[in-house]
Image: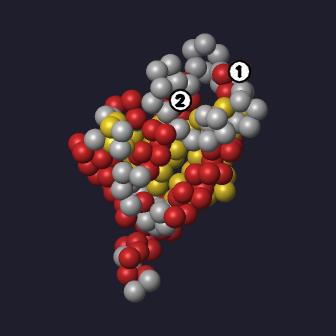
Amino acid sequence: MTERLTIALIYGSGREGRFADTIAGWLEPELAGFHQYDIIRIDPAELVFTPGGLDEASAERVESQILQADAFLIVTPEYNHAYPAALKAIIDSCFRPWHAKPIAFISYGGVSGGLRAVEQLRLVFAELHAVAIRETVSLAHAWTQFDPAGNPFRPGQLNGQLTVLMRRLTWWANALKTARIATRYDEAAA
């Protein structure tokens, strides 16, 4: 299957001065270079949060974008050995639109490179009937891996990891899209 896929690029952090913008600044042109994806950006900095999660308009917007997506690429930091609250609010804003869709992670942080956040997210997405793929791009001490203009110091290494991740994500996206078309996921357990 060579049809275009819609990938939702989800920013995990909404903090001012976040490093996610540097990573996304490197990532988006790389994704465009694959020539097979339509990218939807879900950015917590563009959403409105209440004490209970997203406000109604933001929740509707996010649910619509998640429903549209064939797969997800989550750029997440690790805050205090976990993933950010803004990301959890985005995830919890809906349930069924996540079903039977693949998810890949690009994580960043200190010494762990955000991998503790990813491990927790794998559990959350299993509950949402989503498929978290094994491959991950993990950036330990991420702020030391990019120059002030946002260019990676070792683009070959980083792009090689991204290529493997995107090939796996594409395989899963195509396989699960075909399966969802053949049988609605909700009907598979009926």
Q: Is residue 13 above or below residue 185?
A: above
Which of 100 and 128 lies nearest the eye of the viewer?
128
Task: Locate residue 185, reporting x and y percent.
Answer: 41, 75
Q: Residue furthest left?
A: 57
Q: Position of residue 14 (x, y in %)?
A: 45, 30
Q: Which residue is situated farthest in the bottom direction here?
A: 190
Left or right: 56 as drawn, with respect to 175: left
Q: Which of these two is toward me, 74 or 60?
A: 60
Mark 2 residue type = Ala
**What is the quadrant of residue 69 in the picture?**
bottom left
Count neighbours of disc 1 (C-alpha within 10 A) and say few if under 14, some if 14 to 19, many if 20 or more: few
Cα separation, mark 1 vs mark 2, equals 14 Å
Residue at figure coordinates x 52%, y 64% from the top left: 127
Q: Residue at x 61, y 13 (%)?
A: 148
Quick check: 96 above or below 15?
below
Mark 1 and mark 2 lie on one chain; the one further toward the N terminus is: 2
Q: Is residue 145 left or right of residue 88?
A: right
Query: In the rendered view of the protein, which quadrant contains the C terminus?
Result: bottom left
Q: Is residue 69 visible?
A: yes
Task: Give the tally of numbered discs.
Answer: 2
Q: Which residue position holds label 2?
A: 20
Mark 1 highlights which residue?
144
Residue 81, label in figure = none
Horizontal side, residue 51 vs residue 111: left or right: left
The front one of 128 and 142 is: 128
